[in-house]
Amino acid sequence: MTNHTEGKTAGVITRPPVLYGAALIVALALHWFWPLPIFRTSVVRWLGIAVVALGLEVVLRVFRTMRAAGTNVDPRRPTTAIVTTGLFRFSRNPIYVGLTLI
């Protein structure tokens, strides 16, 4: 018996949030052992918080858009619909855009 969904996934090795999370952990570890005084003003901190909040909003909107379209968010599962609405009008991978902002 053959699997009809075989070969219809993105073929990713790991989930994208794991890659971004690993990069964040490495950056925090480097900062812990070798801190660099780049920007220490409160304006920069608030700007950083705003960018992270924007990234979270992008990811949440994309999840809602994909679920509303009836397709899988998990890249290891088969795609059941092509989404062209919402933030997908501007980017092929808006989840990556959101994760990069975070």
Image (spheres, helix red, strand yellow):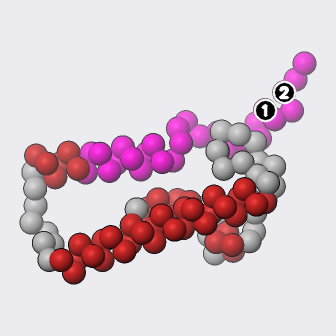
Residue at figure coordinates x 51%, y 68% from the top left: 57
Q: Position of residue 83 (x, y in %)?
A: 75, 63
- Mark number for residue 3? 2
Q: Position of residue 87 (x, y in %)?
A: 64, 72
Q: Alpha-carbon neighbours of circle 2 within 10 Å: few (<14), some, or many (≥20)?
A: few
Look at the image and say whether residue 53 sits in the magenta stretch.
no
Q: Secondary structure at mark 1?
A: loop
Look at the image and say whether residue 10 sits in the magenta stretch.
yes
Q: What residue range appears in magenta?
A: 1-27
Q: Which residue is mark 1?
A: 6
Q: Position of residue 96 (x, y in %)?
A: 52, 59
Give left or right: position of 9 versus 94: right
Is residue 78 something that shows in the picture?
yes
Residue furthest to the top? 1
The amino acid on which the numbered mark 1 sits, given as a three-letter code, is: Glu
Give left or right: position of 82 versus 37: right
For marks 1 and 2, give the CA distance: 5 Å
Residue at figure coordinates x 37%, y 74% from the top left: 50
The amino acid on which the numbered mark 2 sits, given as a three-letter code, is: Asn
- Mark number for residue 58? none
Residue at figure coordinates x 27%, y 76% from the top left: 46
